[in-house]
Amino acid sequence: MKIYNTKEIKNISLLGSKGSGKTTLAEAMLFETGVIKRRGSIAAGNTVSDYFPVEKEYGSSVFSTIFYAEFNGKKLNVIDCPGADDFVGNAVTALNVTDTAVILVNAQYGVEVGTQNIFRTANSVGKPVMFAINQLDGEKADFDNVMEQMRESFGPKIVPVQYPLACGAGFNSVIDVLLMKKLTWGPDGGAPKIEDIPDSEKAKAEEMNQQLIEAAAENDEALMEKFFEEGILSEDEMREGIRKGLVTRSIMPVFCISAQKDMGVRRMMEFLGNVVPFVDEMPAPETTEGVKVKPDPNGPVSIFMFKTTVEPHIGEVQYFKVMSGTLQAGADLDNVSRGTKERLAQLYCVCGQIRESVDKLCAGDIGATVKLKDVRRGNTLDEKGCDYVFDFIKYPAPKYSRAVRPVTESDAEKLSGILSRMHEEDPTWEIEQSKELKQTILSGQGEFHLRTLKWRVENNDKLPIVFEEPRIPYRETITKASRADYRHKKQSGGAGQFGEVHLIVEPYTEGMPEPDTYKFGNQEFKMSVRDKQEIPMEWGGKLIIYNCIVGGAIDARFIPAIVKGLMDRMEQGPLTGSYARDVRVCIYDGKMHPVDSNEISFRLAGRNAFSEAFRNANPKILEPVYDVEVMVPSDVMGDVMSDLQGRRAIIMGMSSDSGFEKISAKVPLKEMSSYSTALSSITGGRSSFTMKFSSYELVPSDVQEKLLKEYAEKQKDED
């Protein structure tokens, strides 16, 4: 194939809610450009996108698919992304390595929560957006209603380039207000018949043409002056104004299509080829050092590895973007992220699972390679002497977690390798070997997201696995001061063990005064502080230890052993075995033996004294609480609110956001376990939510009693 230079390349993300028709549109685009001779269908399982077995099983996209189309002397690199919110990581990746987002809107359902989420993501990374209203031939299609929703959701920058003469089964023509022509398609779509606008539509078309001209002129002073003087712009001038408006994100054009019937697709591709920005017209990405790197084909070679797939008979396929320079096949590059060297023996342009070998790729282009030794997603590879490092993709936090284990325990190591590989393919699958919970925790964007992983492990890797409810990382603390002492004494021939520790525990809060005098019953204990240790806990909170020993009751060399004993109990709290936090301890007295005292004796004495004091200090269990934001359509808001309140949620506020209702709440993690599934069920999949750790809070007394009982039963079973 032809080698395209930087000024001939455009990179585009194809996005939209589930069911908006992205895969079908991708097929039509490839057909229109001659890449494929016959359009496949999702039902037949023969599309260029959705070629993995799991995608054929579910009948929807799970991974993004990269393809290219050569059109009017331009190369369009397109990344077709899954629509389900569970696979948002693909959209995040695509938006970061492309320059323009094409968002599909289903003409039958209008702006959905998924549309909103994708638009926000595009906004957050500063990418131009254009819309295509698809399925205008659908029975419930309503162009005017969809446009109203889009203006309400996305603001006045929405400008239609086309409008349909009829929706539903009769859809076969549009008025194009950029060309100022009527476009009509036959039953098989393809190239339209171009006609003059009928008299009955002229007034409406001229009004919309004027709106488009004004929107285009606003982006260029010279065009604005001409518009004020003559009240009109040529088609080429309008294109230039729209291109500049896309770069500055001050205009969002809207097209009308039926991807299924291949109507309007060629015209939209003309716009992509003629109007949307080239790679060198967009703001330059920055390295981790803040250096802006323009896509200069004559600059030093630097490529960013943004995606990994594992394909049968091939192994790992690495996808990259050429950030700078011109990459030649056979190039030797330094992996600056891992400190290794790589030879890129083969370079490919890709079209789904079809790869076409090329000799070189210029800055801004997207390609693939295979058989690299030690490359991971997110790595930067540079030529010798170049030190660019890129790390600009930030993925959303997980929303749904399950503990995972193999059915056969001996397969644990094999499962670990499979999960690591899958994290490379989709970084929003997160894996944690939790020492605290003694479980492997698999987290993702939703129940469907994790179910997809399970299907792949069991069907592709032939390894049966089990999902279980993840344990909750509770914390233990105390609510009042308490005193205890403990003597550890053991004699069994020869040297014995002896250590006695007296201590006081109390709740710790930031900024509290230094310890002075404590009163328990009729006894008063005055502290004389000799030393202070402040130990931040890895799991949050602190342990503050004061050495208040006077008169040499315990030798200073045994204090570290006592501290180790305290830490033993902080790591395994006396109530439920959970981590403890925010405790202040004063070690004020004790006894030692000139022969039998040693470190182990004082470690055990400190541990047991602390346990007793902790239990007498009105101990409480803390649970993790998350800030949760739920976006819902107004007609199901009451049901969603009721469900949240049943999950012990505290509603913090409600507001409207672009046609949807936003509920803000604080919810215990324990109650969020199955929330993504429940929310989807309540709202018919029309809602989404985010969650972020907020704080640890006291559990209600009835919940604490239940947890204590469960822990006691567990201890009994283990004994």
Image (cartoon, helix red, strand yellow):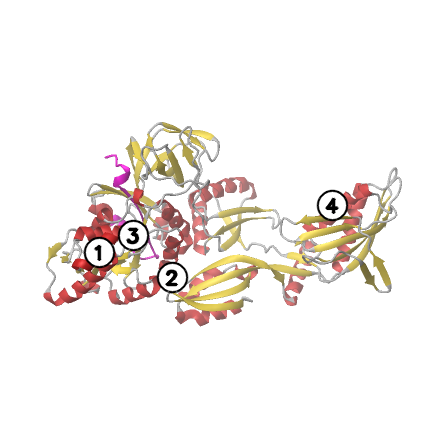
Instruction: State which tag comes first along the sequence, 3 or 4.
Output: 3
The secondary element bearing badge 2 is classed as helix
Dot 3 alpha-carbon crowd within 10 angstroms: few under 14, some 14 to 19, many 20 or more:
many
- On whether residue 175 falls in the magenta region, the answer is no
Which residues fall within the magenta stretch?
Answer: 1-27
Q: Which mark is residue 225?
A: 1
Give the residue type that dot 4 points to. Lys
Residue of label 4: 564
Q: Disc 3 marks which residue?
A: 246
Q: Is residue 109 above or below residue 527?
A: below
| Residue at image coords 81%, 43% | 556
Q: Which of marks 4 and 1 is nearer the N terminus?
A: 1
Q: Where is residue 71 in the image (x, y as percent from the top left)?
A: 21, 43
User: Which mark is first along the chain, 3 or 2?
Assistant: 2
Q: What amino acid is at disc 3?
A: Leu
Image coordinates of residue 284 in percent, x first then y, are 36, 43
Which circle's residue, 1 or 3, is located before the other in the chain? Answer: 1
The first of marks 2 and 1 along the sequence is: 2
Q: What residue type is labelled 2?
A: Val
Give the spatial CA distance, label 2 vs label 1.
40 Å
Q: Is residue 701 in view from this perspective?
A: yes
Considering the numbered disc 3 on the image, is that residue within a helix, a strand or a loop?
helix
Residue type (three-letter) at the residue carrying disc 1: Glu
Where residue 712 sits: x, y (%)?
Answer: 69, 58
| Mark 1 or 3, closer to the camera | 1
Judging by the rendered image, the residue that carries numbered circle 2 is 113
Q: Nearer the viewer, residue 292 or 681?
A: 292
Q: Distance between the residues labelled 3 and 4?
A: 62 Å
